[in-house]
Image (cartoon, coloured by chain):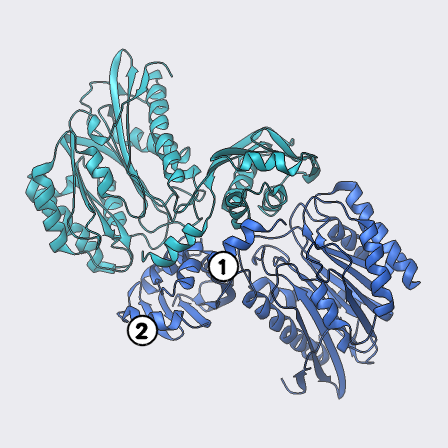
Chain colours: A cyan, B blue
Amino acid sequence: MTGFSFIENGSTTSVPGFKAAGVTAGFKRSGAPDFALLYSEVPADAAGVFTTCLFAAAPVRYCKALLAKGTKLQAVSINSGIANACTGKQGLEGSRKTAEQVASRLNIPVDSVAVASTGRIGVQMDMGLICKGLDLAVPRLSSDGGNDAARAIMTTDTVPKAAAAKVVINGKTVTIGAMTKGAGMINPGLAGLHATMLCFITTDAKIDRALLGNILQESADNSFNRITVDGDMSTNDTVLLLANGLSGVEIKAGTQEEADFKAALLEVTKNLAHRMVKDGEGSTKLVTIEVVNARSVEDARKAAESVANSLLCKTAWFGNDPNWGRIAAALGYSGAEFDPDKCDITIDGVPVMTRGGDAGTPESVAAEQVKKQEFTIRCDFNDGDSSYWVWSSDISYEYVKINADYHT
Amino acid sequence: MTGFSFIENGSTTSVPGFKAAGVTAGFKRSGAPDFALLYSEVPADAAGVFTTCLFAAAPVRYCKALLAKGTKLQAVSINSGIANACTGKQGLEGSRKTAEQVASRLNIPVDSVAVASTGRIGVQMDMGLICKGLDLAVPRLSSDGGNDAARAIMTTDTVPKAAAAKVVINGKTVTIGAMTKGAGMINPGLAGLHATMLCFITTDAKIDRALLGNILQESADNSFNRITVDGDMSTNDTVLLLANGLSGVEIKAGTQEEADFKAALLEVTKNLAHRMVKDGEGSTKLVTIEVVNARSVEDARKAAESVANSLLCKTAWFGNDPNWGRIAAALGYSGAEFDPDKCDITIDGVPVMTRGGDAGTPESVAAEQVKKQEFTIRCDFNDGDSSYWVWSSDISYEYVKINADYHT
């Protein structure tokens, strides 16, 4: 992409007009930062995509209702440690009270405040901790606080994940910033958004709400919805995009400007999605699953996600075992329609299955590919012209340890 | 059930007219028994259910074609160590040659011999080992060889799994015997049979082929298709039922005799299915997931299987963590339709979620339930009158170790 470049140590606050802070409010027993505040100096157009889980958490339901009203947003409050999910009416009340606290301290309308939560399910929001977080965060809001905020939204993540990029659109510079958290409960592939994650994206492009929603969904479908760690989906998945318009660059549907912005946004969201898989709980490898020449995109998607979520494949990758038989089995039970006798599989270019049978590559050669920290499994159905790809990770002892010990 | 009882140390050869043997042919590097032969003194009516994986192994394709012809069966040859899957035309040839060897040594028609394989995918059948297995097994065929055969079909199983029972039907005794293997690659819930497993069932009831097929499918749907270890389905799943008619008890469709036989068969297959989950790779617990009062059986099934296959739930159980939030999340993303605000969840009778929120039970009390080797998670949707249940297991370090090290 011409005129596109990532900003070193970029974050949500690399975008003019946005400030952020990350502080320790006390949600986490560890004393690690656990409360983040994102602030836009001017009201920003906003769009969101959310979990499709029926037990959607209170903040998810609160934000969906807020966005449905079409109000502009000026702040997002995020806590890590309490998910405020399965908390009924009292939970919704907790989200509303949180928004009220933020609004009153920042002197902005309540309806301009979004809230997000991650952490343990079934626990009511602790308003004392929210107030403590705001006491600390409001005075620290700054235009270089994006990386602190990225650190404060982490749960089992081992590294904070923020990014920002500049792109020249129609001769002017537009900036896009973002932060994500998410290391487990991650799965793509259902309707809507399916990565268990929080993501907050900022930009100074000017885009109306309806178009912003379409662009965000498309971007999520091609990045966050392409990743899987464990096949579980959370109650709290939230991706919010705030566009404050300060660049003066207006993006309209069907224009070259829209194409340029979408391409740039996708670069940023793919960058973060890639890092989320690499930071997947206990994961040691990032595996790209490509299914090509399938009869339909749906067939390719089913097949790719089946391999990506197969516990037997994921444990084999952890064990440096190319085990193409498990890949074939996962393709075969995926529900995708294809002719098994035409199927070829390669691992980082090395053939392991040819036309449904052993490609004859010595196992030691195939094993070398699987030992890499990143490799690509390409499944060619030779049976059509549709394709799909997914990023997956391996499953290690550490994954089991983290999830047997961690109380969500 | 009146007139029903399990036979101590029962097996396929507890049924009059059946002989079996289990020997070491050399398929396994360990030197453990790896070849079994099951023999019926008279031609037996037969039915089978098989994997729905598109990459169905050669022996599966061979048996399906054989059963479609409607010939009676007199022998089944089973090897453990080579799956003969993804082996193309040469693989099918391997299955045919195996049947020919068995037929010639037992002096029975080729079309009366079924074959089954389990083990590594993508490796061609070794006819030398088949011949060696037959050299050893044919002279050892005996009416108390059923337990040896059950041991020889094991792969990662830690214990052999055989059973037999007697049931009085219409005043006469009918015997049912069976053996299974299967400890990983186990998943229910797609069309047809979905447990990755081999199972061979014998009976001296007289049942015609068409009815036998219906009875076997119904029995599998309520036993083997109710269990999950890792959500993976194999290329080699095979359940065969041989009925030699020697008891003189004829079972006809729609009669009390049929109801009695089905009930007895289900007792035997559920007994084996239960033991397969308990012997699930690395599993330390057996968890029954019940979903009740759902809008439809399909909703109940989706919800139950979603919890049963959730890695986050399975690792929580391993960690003695009741974590009802993960159960709720899995119900919520299952695709089942229900009202989350009406949902109750209990663990062995102890309420953990009431009407979509925390039931208020102290975590230590709920944790006591999850520490048990067997417990039941009951999800009441209070939203209809349909129900479904599944047996699942936990996922441990040992599961990862087994599957990172074992080359299927």
Tell me which corner region of the image, top left, top right, bottom left or bottom right, holds residue B199.
bottom right
Element type at mark 2: helix
Q: Which mark is residue A263?
A: none
Image side of residue B30 versus residue A253, left or right: right
Q: CA distance from mark 2 to mark 1?
A: 26 Å
Residue type at mark 2: give it: Val
Mark 2 highlights which residue? B365
**Above or below, comparing residue A46 to residue B18 in the picture:** above
Q: Which mark is residue B305?
A: 1
Image side of residue A275 versus residue B168, left or right: left
The structure residue drawn at horizontal position 20% and vertical position 47%, both measured from the top left corner, is A34
In which chain is the residue bearing label 2? B
Disc 2: CA contacts within 10 A as few (<14), some (14-19) or many (>=20): few
Residue type at mark 1: give it: Glu
- Can you name the residue that lies furthest to the top here? A171
Residue A321 point in image, percent of width and height: 57, 43
Query: Which marked residue is nearer to the observer: mark 2 or mark 1?
Result: 2
Residue B240 point in image, percent of width and height: 73, 63
Q: Assign the N terminus of chain B to one quadrant of the image.
A: bottom right
